[in-house]
Image: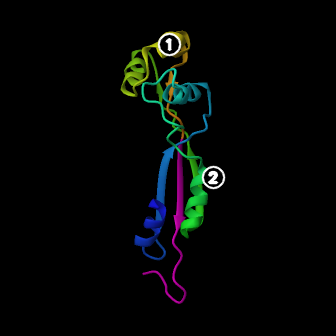
Amino acid sequence: MFLSECYRVLRPGGITIHSFLSPTPRNSRQKLLIEADTDPIWTKTPPKEWFSPKPTHVVSKLTRAGFRDIHVERMKSNLIIRAEAVKAFLHSWDVRSAFWKAHEAELAREGLELPDWVVVSGRKLQRTGHTAR
């Protein structure tokens, strides 16, 4: 519904751009962060799934809404959280302290890393016989 509304209000030739954290971890630090946020053992507010959709799902929804020239770009975050900042970060995401205790050595050594960003864009095609200004 949201993407079809984006299509409706966008001028012909316009571009919609959406970004979200990748649901696919690139390394063990990212995997650990996603686990901390999604596993009911660790989080006080477990979601049914990681809040970021798979890029293929977004591409499918954009196509169904009418967008064309769809592009997917993955940008490495490289944002690594270390030491005491990890504890504060986990607390801010409602992760139980038991997660820190269970993974303390790894968290102290490696830290956590925010997942990479996925940016998906699509264009609303020009109406036939019209040109962009």
Query: In the structure shown, which secondary structural element does the residue marked by tag 2 occupy?
Result: helix
Name above or below for residue 51 compared with residue 97.
Answer: below
Q: Is residue 96 a member of the stretch shown in magenta?
A: no
Q: Position of residue 14 (x, y in %)?
A: 46, 71
Mark carried by residue 125:
none
Magenta span: 117-133
Q: Gap between marks 2 and 1, in whole Å?
A: 35 Å
**Image point (52%, 43%), residue name:** 52
Specify the label residue 56 is tagged with: 2
Residue under pointer 1? 108
Q: At x 56% / y 14%, what residue is drawn?
A: 106
Q: Is residue 119 magenta?
A: yes
Q: Badge 1: few (under 14), some or many (20 or more) residues near its Cα, within 10 Å?
A: some
Q: Give the residue drawn at x 49%, y 32%.
A: 114
Image coords of residue 42 (percent x, y): 49, 21
- Residue 71 in view of the camera: no
Identify which residue, 46 or 23, lies in the foreground.
46
